[in-house]
Amino acid sequence: MLVLARKLDESIIIGDNISIKVISIEKGVVKLGIDAPRDVDIIRNELIEDIKDSNIAASKEQNVTDLNTLSKILKK
């Protein structure tokens, strides 16, 4: 992991077309502005973890009737 120190209004560039700028620092919270092409997904890590946890929980919920129905549909 690369660790950089940036001050207010300073930025870093990733590749040719992604810029991350420190917008504000208030009460221990750093606000970042990210300028990137629309085709680049930017997702907060905690949301990804929530989605992973939800997917794991959903995969553990097994309804035998639903599985049998799905199996019959797929065999057609």
Image (tube, grey):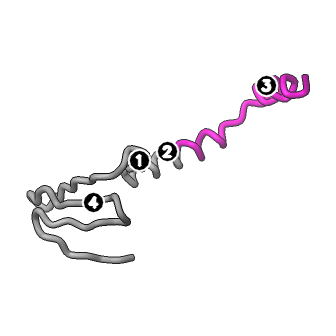
Residue annotated with mark 2 = 51
Assign a secondary structure to mark 3.
helix
- Tag 4 residue: 19
Check contact, mark 4 vs mark 1: CB within 8 A: no
Q: Earlier in the sequence, mark 2 or mark 3?
A: 2
User: Residue at left 35%, top 77%?
Assistant: 2
Question: Where in the figure is residue 12, as x and y percent of width and height?
Answer: 25, 67
44 drawn magenta: no
Give the distance between the C-alpha atoms of the residues marked 2 and 3, in whole angstroms.
26 Å
Q: Residues within 10 Å of mark 3 (few under 14, many from 20)?
A: few
In whole angstroms, how far apart are the C-alphas of marks 4 and 2? Answer: 27 Å
Q: CA distance from mark 3 to mark 1?
A: 32 Å
Choose the circle earlier in sequence order: 4 or 1.
Answer: 4
Q: Which residues are magenta?
A: 54-76
Which of the two discs, 4 and 1, sits closer to the camera?
Answer: 4
Q: Nearer the viewer, mark 2 or mark 3?
A: 2
Question: Residue 47's mark?
Answer: 1
Indicate which label's residue lies in the foreground, 4 or 3. Answer: 4
Q: Position of residue 42 (x, y in %)?
A: 38, 50
Are discs 2 and 1 less than 8 Å apart at CB?
A: yes
Q: Is residue 73 left or right of residue 3?
A: right
Residue 40: image location, x then y, percent: 42, 50
Q: Could you tell me the amino acid type at mark 3?
A: Thr
Label 4 or label 2, whichever comes before in sequence order: 4
Decide which of tag 3 and tag 1 comes sooner along the chain. Answer: 1
Q: Amino acid at mark 2?
A: Ile
Is most of the magenta stretch helix, strand or loop? helix
Q: Residues within 10 Å of mark 4 (few under 14, many from 20)?
A: some
- Disc 4 marks a residue whose amino acid type is Ser
Against 76, is 63 above or below?
A: below
